[in-house]
Image (tube, rainbow, N blue to C red):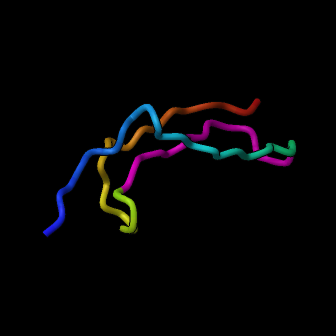
Amino acid sequence: MGTATSPDPTRLQSNFSYTFNGSEPAGTYRWLGAFVEPGTPLNLISDITQPSFEFR
């Protein structure tokens, strides 16, 4: 049987980017983000964050 360990939070890194091209409709949008357990599709190990932003 293996031993489970917590990931080192200083080694976690996210490399996500999206370039807005100006064709997005004006309005309020939200990014959704969370950490999942590696190797699982949706086993959440953090809260879901929902920062909002707006196009005018």
State which quadrant residue 48 falls in. Answer: top left
Q: Quadrant of the C terminus?
A: top right
Residue visible at 42% across and 38% down?
49
Q: Quadrant of the N terminus?
A: bottom left
Outermost residue, left direction?
1
State which quadrant residue 30 falls in. Answer: top right
Residue visible at 37% across and 55% down?
36
Residue visible at 66% across and 31% down?
54
Q: How many marks?
A: 0
Is 52 covered by the magenta stretch?
no
Residue visible at 29% across and 49% down?
45
Q: Nearest the camera: 31 or 40?
A: 40
Q: Main secondary structure of the magenta part?
A: loop
Image x and y of residue 18, in percent: 73, 46
Q: Is residue 53 left or right of residue 49?
A: right
Q: Is residue 28 left or right of residue 11?
A: right
Image x and y of residue 41, in percent: 40, 68
Image x and y of residue 15, in percent: 63, 44
Q: Is residue 39 left or right of residue 26?
A: left
Q: Above or below — where is 49 with respect to 42?
A: above
Is 33 covered by the magenta stretch?
yes
The range drawn in magenta is: 23-36
Outermost residue, right direction?
22
